[in-house]
Image: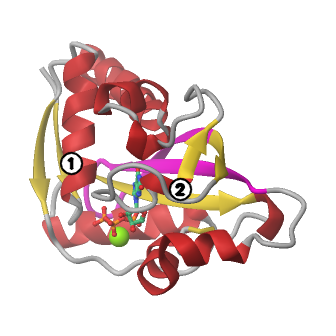
């Protein structure tokens, strides 16, 4: 059996991670720690590495962190890793308005899990992406920008309109977590 400490302050992320692993029949046990770690500016990979490194130093043990970015094609990938601040300041309507006048509303939801074997080690990254379109908000509003992201594979529904089990089959988080799961299973077999 494998386990990891997931450093996140986001209850929705934790819930989805547990649901995705359970749906896949994985025996990986997840415990969570809501410690505050700084998030630097930079590429999604630089942000993920710095956050995981800081979390491992603070915890003094191996850990997993996760960063989610929402990248607009028309804006060359922005807001990207800064989506949290954009959501907080301009919300669903503002994010839609931002794209008015551009030829495309295409967007990529990008999830980056980072695994650190412990302090002073380089974190390893696992990325997952889901392509979609930014639309006027539809569906329940309990998780971030779910109501304005309509994945290409979602049969016309936004993430928010999907049942959790539906989102978890095609989501950026599912795709990245699957790579982490395979890596941890391989490590456990080697040990
Ligand atoms: O609609 C959504 N569907 C998702 O699947 C999803 N995953 C993350 N987010 C939001 O995007 C920002 C990422 O920032 P983020 O990666 O720094 O996360 P966070 O600060 O909330 O938690 P953490 O850093 O403690 O893990 C935050 O506003 C999250 O709420 C999502 N919104
Ligand atoms: Mg964060």
Label 1: state its secondary structure.
helix
Q: Magenta span: helix, strand or loop, mainly?
A: strand
Instruction: Give the CA separation, mark 1 to mark 2.
Output: 21 Å
Range covered by the magenta-colored residues: 105-130
Q: Is residue 184 above or below residue 132?
A: above
Q: Which residue reaches farthest bottom? A: 89
Q: Residues within 10 Å of mark 2 (few under 14, many from 20)?
A: many
Location of mark 1 (residue):
14
Residue at position x 16%, y 56% from top?
61
Q: Is residue 14 above or below residue 82?
A: above
Residue at position x 84%, y 56% from top?
104
Horizontal relation, residue 108 to residue 89: left or right: right
Q: How many marks?
A: 2
Q: Residues within 10 Å of mark 1 (few under 14, many from 20)?
A: some
Give 131 or 186, whichever is nearer the viewer.
131
Location of mark 2 (residue):
148
Residue at position x 26%, y 39% from top?
17
Residue 18 among those drawn in magenta: no
Q: Is residue 185 above or below residue 151?
A: above
């Amino acid at each position: 059996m494998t386990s990891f400490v997931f450093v996140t302050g986001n209850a929705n992320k934790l819930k989805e991670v547990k649901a995705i692993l359970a749906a896949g029949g994985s025996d990986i046990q997840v415990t969570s720690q809501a410690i505050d770690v700084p998030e630097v500016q930079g590429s999604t990979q630089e942000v993920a590495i710095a956050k995981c490194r800081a979390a491992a130093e603070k915890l003094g043990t191996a850990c997993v962190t996760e960063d989610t970015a929402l990248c607009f094609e028309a804006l060359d990938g922005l807001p990207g890793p800064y989506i949290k601040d954009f959501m907080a300041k301009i919300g669903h309507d503002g994010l839609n308005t931002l794209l008015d006048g551009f030829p495309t509303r295409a967007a990529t939801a990008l999830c980056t899990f980072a695994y650190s074997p412990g302090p002073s080690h380089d974190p390893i990254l696992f990325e997952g992406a889901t392509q979609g379109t930014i639309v006027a908000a539809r569906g329940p509003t309990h998780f971030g920008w779910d109501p304005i992201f309509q994945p290409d594979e979602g049969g016309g529904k936004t993430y928010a309109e999907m049942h959790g089990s539906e989102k978890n089959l095609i989501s950026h988080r599912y795709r990245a977590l699957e790579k982490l799961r395979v890596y941890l299973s391989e490590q456990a077999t080697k040990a």
